[in-house]
Amino acid sequence: MALTQIDHVGENEQMAECIDNCLAAAQACEWCADECLGDEEMEECARLCRDVADLTTLHARFMARDSNYSPQLAQACAGACEECAEECERHDAEHCQVCAEVLRDCAETCREMAS
C-alpha cells in the first residue's frame, strides 16, 4: 500500500492507487518473466514484462517524490502495460493471464495520472 503519510500521496487517492497498481504490476511482471524464461515462444513476453517491471517501479518512485516528470512517465507506463498485457493474453499460462489482468488495472490508473 502506498504510504499515505507522504502528504501529496495521502491527499491524492488517485496517486495512491496508481502507486499500488504500479508496484503490483512490477511484481506480476517479474513473476511472469521468470516463468517465461527458457521457453522460446515466451521470449517476447519475458522481455516486455521486464521492461514494464522497470518502468512501473520507476514511476512509483517518481510519484512518491512528486516528480515533475511523473505525467510523462505515466503515459509511457500506460502504453507499455497495454502492450505487455496484449502479449500476455496470447498465452494460456496462469502467470500470463494474472499478469495481463494486473497490467490492465495499472494501465488505466497510469492513463488517469497522465491526464
Image: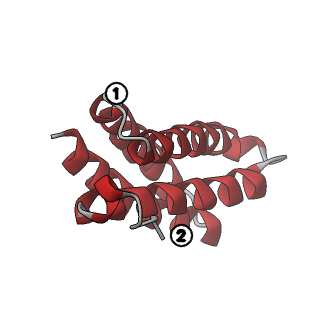
Q: Which image quarter is the C terminus in?
A: top left
Q: Position of residue 14 (x, y in %)?
A: 24, 60
Find residue 114 and report its horizontal and vertical position in percent.
Answer: 22, 39
Which amino acid, by three-letter code, is at mark 2? Val
Disc 1 secondary structure class:
loop
Within the image, what quadrant is residue 6 found in?
bottom left
Find the residue positioned furthest to the right: 38
| Residue drawn at (58%, 53%) of the image | 26
- For the residues labelled 2 and 1, say whether their Cβ atoms are less than 8 Å apart: no
Mark toward the start of the polypeptide (2 vs 1): 1
Evaluate whether residue 18 shows in this view. Answer: yes
- The residue tagged 2 is 98
Dot 2 falls on a residue whose secondary structure is: helix
Q: Is residue 101 above or below residue 8?
A: below
Q: What amino acid is at disc 1?
A: Tyr
User: Which residue is rendered at x = 27% and y = 34% of the image?
Assistant: 71
